[in-house]
Image: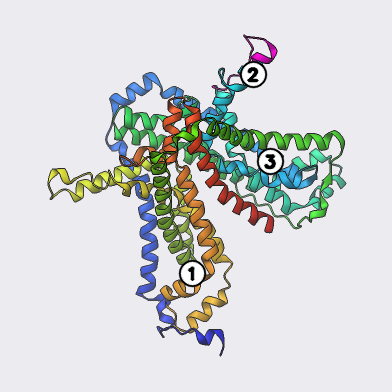
Amino acid sequence: MSVAAQTRFPATGSGTWLSARGRGWRAGAGLTALLVALPIVLVLSAWLEPQPEVWRHLADTVLGELLRNTAVLIVGVGLGVVIVGVGLAWLTAMYEFPGRALFEWALVLPLAMPAYVLAFVAVGLLDFSGPVQTGLRALLGIEALWFPPIRSEGGVIAVLTLAFYPYVYMLARAAFLSQGQAMLESGRVLGLSTWGAFRRVALPMARPAIAAGAALALMETLADFGAVTVFNYDTFTTAIYKAWFGLFNLPAAAQLASLLLLFVGLALYGERRARGQARYHAAVRRGRESRYRLRGWRAAAASGVAALVVGAAFVVPVGQLLVWVAGGAWRDLDSRYFDFLLHTVTLGAAAASITVAIGLLIAHVRRAWPTPGTRALAQFATLGYALPGSVLAVGSMLLFVWLDRWLSADTPADAGAVLSSGLAALLFAYVVRFLAVSYGPLDSAFERIKPSIAQAARSLGASQRELLWRVYLPILRPGLLSAALLVLVEVMKEMPATLLLRPFGWDTLALRIFEMTSEGEWERAALPALSLVLVGLLPVALLVRRSAAS
């Protein structure tokens, strides 16, 4: 008996796929997309409640500085991640030098290092009273030694560049690997130098990948709260927090969030506008043996540059965290610390479960009905990843405050604020923010399933639910695990949404880091920071393994 004959499904008939039940699946996915859009709509609707006094105060004090700082950060980090990411991608993809096999995956490790952890380690190491400057003054015997100030605009840009360059590095390297050296050889035959072939042939072909990586890095830059707080560098993200908790004015925080949303929209529009209708296709694929071999000082320089970036972005910070933990931070390992760890894992696991379930629904609908409408629905539902956590926190709070008022309209006054003061608003913000993280691996896993499998199930009368539960889920287990793990780690590292929405008594490792760094206690922040980094290595290791296998 064949495998197909052994699997028996109720004879529901082929009409099931176009029946009311099928419309129900699509309606469920559409409702999910609508819920995702609600926080954005509510943030924009905050302008219906003017706050002239607050805006006059902001205009007279910090608004100009916020605009300037945010613009400088976007330009500086954007240039930094492109230069570092593209340069290292080109180096490891096209050249052979000592340590290349190690560096090609080690350069991805900074993804496991939250930007705010890298920030407080940099300040702790390089500040005037830190071990680097103190050691140099003692070694050279110079009390008034000049040293580049780490608490500066350049310091913020450098730290965020080191934290986010892997987005550009991974995508650009994949693009360069797909081109191979044949493209460069063609350029050199036409009289171009190596630099000219790179600039006029390889770089334009890799432009879409570079632009996508840079866009991800800029979204993370706009969303950052912890790193800029460590440097006392005011941006719109910090202003939203101050308006909410300093002025106790949620509408003003929402209006500031809408301006930050405008920055996000302009960044996405600029990237698409710059790309236009251009399309680049590589007709060849390089082999492993086709790298140029560097020799002499060039080989030493290549190894040195790669080692410098890996050391500054990952090895030295992890080493300093270990030193601080061994030096006494381990004494914080008490019952409170385990509560922080439990809250972090619980929130991450709950958000991962909900987000993966919703991502599975949308990916399944997209697979079952491959129409322009379902494709647009999937893109719309995953829009939240482009939005900062602070924006989603404000939108989620507005939504749940409205729900509380609606639910308590016919109940005693003390029955309100149930949803907005609980975990529901926080989990909702997580789901909206990281739905794209779960949808990506699941959609890729669906694409690898042969259509003939679904056709065989339909011929046996399988319904959509049976197809998903009994056929797709066993095949999708690796993709489900990857999606859940990625969302888990992203939620554990998320700081702005957690800081603004967590209920009383639900502090996490990320908030413990924020609490300690706000007081300048870098050593005590080392233990939760090291825990986050170690957990963050799991998806990075998975990413490296997949990259090596592909």
Q: Is mark 3 on a helix, strand or loop?
A: helix
* Residue name at image x 51 percent, y 56 percent: 483
- Tell me the residue that label 1 is attached to: 473
Q: Of the residues under marks 3 and 2, which one precedes in the sequence?
A: 3
Answer yes or no: is residue 78 visible: no
* Residue name at image x 36 percent, y 38 percent: 500
Q: Which of 493 and 172 is in front in this view?
A: 493
* Residue name at image x 36 percent, y 28 percent: 242
Q: Which amino acid does label 2 sit on?
A: Gly
- Tell me the residue that label 2 is attached to: 135
Dot label at residue 191? none
Q: Where is residue 523 in the image (x, y as percent from the top left)?
A: 50, 29
Q: What element carries label 2?
A: helix
Query: Where 227 falls versus 462 (above or below)?
Result: above
Q: What stretch is highlighted in magenta?
A: 137-151
**Label 2 near label 3: C-beta < 8 Å?**
no
Query: Where 464 falls versus 477 (above or below)?
Result: below
